[in-house]
Image (tube, grey):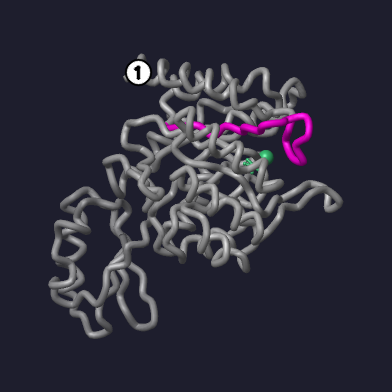
Amino acid sequence: MIIVMHPDATEAEVALVVERLRSVGAEVSITTDDGRTVVHGSIETLLQDEAPWDSFPGVERVMPVLRGGRRVGREFKSDDSIVRVGSVQIGDGELCVIAGPCAVESRDQLITTAESVAQSGASILRGDAFKPRTSPYTFQGLGKAGLEILAEARDLTGLPFVAEVIDPRDVELVASYADMVRIGTRNMSNQALLCEVGRQPKPVLLKRGRAATVEEWIDAAEYVHSEGNPSIVLVERGVRGFDTSARNTLDLTAVPVAKKETHLPVMVDPSHAAGRRDIVGPLARAAVAVGADGVLIDVHPNPAAALVDGAQALLPSEFATLMDQLRAVAAAIR
Ligand code: PEP
Ligand code: MN
């Protein structure tokens, strides 16, 4: 934590602050900034809540910016955070399943999928109106019309929905429709976008960058939190490896690591990790077993005709079977 002293603070007042920090085990360093003495404590402690810093003589302000710590880190908050998405809670110990097509392609396609995943017990609907495609000549999403279809599906099924935002200029638009906004793997290190979603109140689903370390992923979450939005859910979705047998390599190690390092809920997207439907089920079951707070599953009523990611989408009937299995795994590990 950083404590900025008044320009006219006395040496004794600075010493009192230093002594208090040291008494809870902090390493202390002192710098000056614009004529003020700035005291840096190396650890974030509960002091911020417990010590009445504002009434310490000579203290001008306490900056909740941490040195050697992060707001999303356990050192800042030791208990698990629960993130609310509409009426759904993520991280409360119940398994959360987000399901739906990769992209909204038409009203029929989305409504059919939404009704089937709702019936199978999904908690949140997924479906994108803006797609970050590798090629500029492929389907890029329906834009605002797609968001309108998603909102209609929410009205019909009662499921809140999450949709990706890829451009800081669209954050307000997407957040005005969606119950949760998603940052995709390609944008995990787009700090302008992270800050923009951090400045709006809807919860944020933050995918891990496909070549990002867990540390970098957590730092990306810190960008969102640092702008004022603490409602963040991390998603492991596979990283690029040397093996071409699946689209990505699902890094299940990241789940317990991220849960240990941060207080945020952690989910897994086995669909985008696998890129192929035949192994989505086993990966999803493993994700629940390893302690993920939930999973994201691509579901499409006609995967062969899907405009995006058809190869990994489950049929609604396959999804229904998987839901039963996931409930059994969740109950077993509880
Ligand atoms: C998606 O969920 O549709 C998606 C594009 O995921 P990712 O960013 O993980 O590739
Ligand atoms: Mn996709």
Find residue 21 and report its horizontal and vertical position in percent. Answer: 21, 57
Horizontal side of 163 relative to 305 (left or right) equals: left
Callout 1: helix, strand or loop? helix
- Residue at 23 percent across and 85 percent down: it is 8
Q: Left or right of 292: which side holds 137?
A: right
- Residue 184 falls left or right of residue 285: right
For the magenta stretch, what is the residue range?
293-310
Q: Amino acid at mark 1?
A: Ala
* Vertical position of residue 35 compared to residue 276: above or below: below
Front-most of 253 and 39? 253
Q: How many marks?
A: 1
Across and down, in percent, residue 124 comes to 47, 41
Which of the image's four quarters has the C terminus?
top left
Q: Residues within 10 Å of mark 1 (few under 14, many from 20)?
A: few
Q: Is residue 8 above or below residue 304?
A: below
Instruction: State whether residue 290 is above or below residue 58.
Output: above
Residue 68 appears in the rendering: no
**Which quadrant holds residue 58?**
bottom left
**Residue under the image location 71 percent in, 46 percent down:** 105
| Residue located 47% across and 61% down the image | 198
Ligand 2 sits in quadrant:
top right
Q: Which one is in front, 149 or 163?
A: 149
Residue wearing tag 1: 331
Residue 105 in view in this figure: yes
Whole-percent x, y for residue 1 in the image:
31, 59
